[in-house]
Image: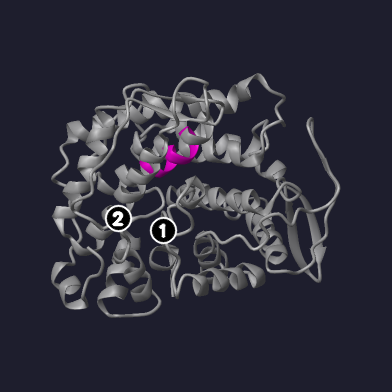
Amino acid sequence: MKSTTLATLCSLIAISTADAASHLSKHESSRSSFIHPGLLHTSSDFSRIIDKVSSKAEPWLTGWYKLTNSSYINLDYTPSPKTIVYRGSDGTHSQNYPSLYRDIAAGYTMAIYWKVTGNTSYADKVVTILDDWASTLTGITGSTDADLAAGIYGYEFANVAELMRDYSGWPAANLTRFTDMMVDVFYPINHDFLVRHNDAAVDHYWANWDLCNIASVLSIGVLSDNATMYDEGITYFKSGAGNGQIEKTIWKLYDVDGETLGQGQEAGRDQGHSMLDFALLGAIAQTAYNQGDDLFGYLDNRILAGAEYVAKYNLGYDVPYTNYTNSDVTQTVISDNSRGDIRPIWELLYNHYGLLKGLNVTYTKEYRDLVVKDGSGAEGGGGDYGSTSGGYDQLGYGTLLYTLQ
């Protein structure tokens, strides 16, 4: 399916009013205060989206067409679950992790389509993807890049399941089986990486490695109603030992013409990974915010300071730079590698800081405008920004999903 008329949309629109089932992780206790759905999106978000799309309001309508024109809106889509996912060469096995990120992109795109239209044919396709992986996947390995796979795809896959948890056509036992798979396969890798960092120096790994694993721990914690796990992610963000701790990720602040700019830990490495840090910080903060924890505002809006810095530099402006040194590198200049990188991450940050909180988002807004223009009026999703893993490092569709007014 490539597009949907408004008449069809209006006839299909429905929101499930069923209460989200609460399922215990088999490893930890329940926290009854978790909000479901409550990762990147809540029920109130979908109420807004449905209202705006059905009334043909912009930019939501353009965002909607961006999603419905995705090749992943496809009832003939066939998932490709693996028993073991390999990312990075182990010298023996071929890498097969694209099957995972493509299935996640398909599941996420069709889950949103179901949420907005109520068309259960697409919901059934999503739960087929979830059920197939839950009954097949037993491990993630390869090189140390397996830690990236467990982090990025962990938080993304948890979001797909969280969207589907109130679908009456997905039996509670199947949700439990999927949740147990996330707890047994993804979470141990996330936790081990944050604790041990593969026995490397604690500052060896770039910030995005920590951040993706924090995002996964938080997301699986919410999915499984596991307060201990969720709190682990929040605590690491605030006081962890590695570079994903917020004061290490955005480690140097500057006052430039009355605006606070924050130099990111990966600024001297390249701009693609600098952008990835903010894709992950946005997901972490949005998840926590939907559960009542304001990491957006933490340390005087530290994430915003970093977003303004990376956006300003990638728009072509000069920014201050302080030499960065860790156990492995000394970087004396900011990198221009991948400068101007386009990722669908800016609507979330712009709408929260600029519209919801009314803060100065000069460069975040300008970069949002650039990305939206590049996407013909809306942020796209998985596969719209490259066919390899970088094009799937964020779930996207921010114009549709995060625009507030």
**Image: magenta residue range:** 150-157
The residue drawn where x is 64% and y is 33% is 240
Report whether 270 appears left or right of 320.
left
The disc at residue 343 is none
Which circle's residue, 2 or 1, is located before the other in the chain? 2
Instruction: Specify whether residue 153 is painted magenta.
Output: yes
Query: In this orientation, which residue lies closer to the viewer: 273 or 291?
Result: 273
Task: Tell me the quadrant of the picture where the N terminus can be found.
Answer: bottom left
In x, y percent, where is residue 242?
67, 33
Query: In this orientation, which residue lies closer to the viewer: 209 or 405?
Result: 209
Q: CA distance from mark 2 to mark 1?
A: 10 Å
Report whether 147 appears left or right of 250.
left
The residue drawn where x is 14% and y is 54% is 121
Instruction: Specify whether residue 96 is painted magenta.
Output: no
Task: Please rate how many residues cluster around mark 1, counting C-alpha atoms within 10 Å: few if below 14, some from 14 to 19, many from 20.
Answer: many
Task: Tell me the quadrant of the picture where the C terminus can be found.
Answer: bottom left
In x, y percent, where is residue 60?
37, 73
Q: Which residue is mark 1?
A: 381
- Whether label 2 touches label 1, CB < 8 Å: yes
Of helix, strand and loop, which one carries label 2? loop
SS majority, magenta: helix
Of helix, strand and loop, which one carries label 1? loop
The residue drawn where x is 43% and y is 59% is 384
The residue drawn where x is 43% and y is 37% is 154
Report whether 81 appears left or right of 188.
left
Figure quadrant of residue 5 = bottom left
Look at discs 2 and 1 and give the one toward the viewer.
2
Q: Which residue is mark 2?
A: 72
Q: Is residue 89 above or below residue 12?
A: above
